[in-house]
Image: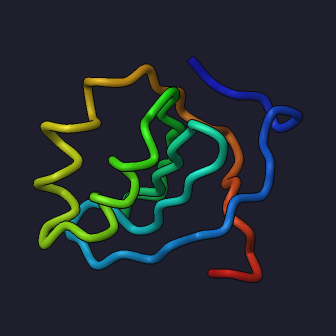
Amino acid sequence: PRVTPDEVRSIAANHITSTNLNRVGYQGSTLYIAFNSGAVYQYEKVPYILFAALLAAESAGKFFNPKIRNAYAYKLLMLDPFDQAAT
């Protein structure tokens, strides 16, 4: 599923060093992840503790794949929701 531009809010970006992930953000209970490929997804109903653990992980990709990737409902976003001032 895709999210329309009207559904996208500006999210502060947290840049991370990863071979797969580029930026992450969190708002409400939604986790936003921008991949190095350019794709941006939102993951719904993700506990904040998982967002904090992702930021603190030694390897963001190794944390993301088993803990978040297929564990939460997700949508591909048509527009990048990250605050451009923070990038």
In the rendered image, residue 38, in percent from the top left (x then y), is placed at 48, 58
In the picture, measured across the screen, residue 79 lies left or right of residue 33, that is: right
Q: Residue at x 71, y 47 (%)?
A: 79
Quadrant location of the C terminus? bottom right
Scheme of image coloration: rainbow
Report the residue at 47% width, 34% height from top: 43
Instruction: Please say if 50 is above or below 11.
Output: above
Residue 68: x percent and y percent? 28, 37
Q: Residue furthest front?
A: 49
Q: Position of residue 71 (x, y in %)?
A: 27, 24
The image quadrant of residue 30 is top right
**Apparent side of residue 33 relative to residue 62 in the rendered image (left or right):** right
Residue at the (70%, 59%) spot, across then down: 11
Q: Residue at x 20, y 38 (%)?
A: 67
**Image mark count:** 0
Direction right: furthest residue: 6
- Which of 11 and 48 lies nearest the eye of the viewer? 48
The N terminus lies in quadrant: top right
- Is 34 positioned to the left or the right of 68 in the image? right
Residue 8 x %, y %: 78, 42
In the displayed structure, would residue 84 be above or below residue 11?
A: below
- Residue 2 versus residue 48: which sits nearer the camera? 48
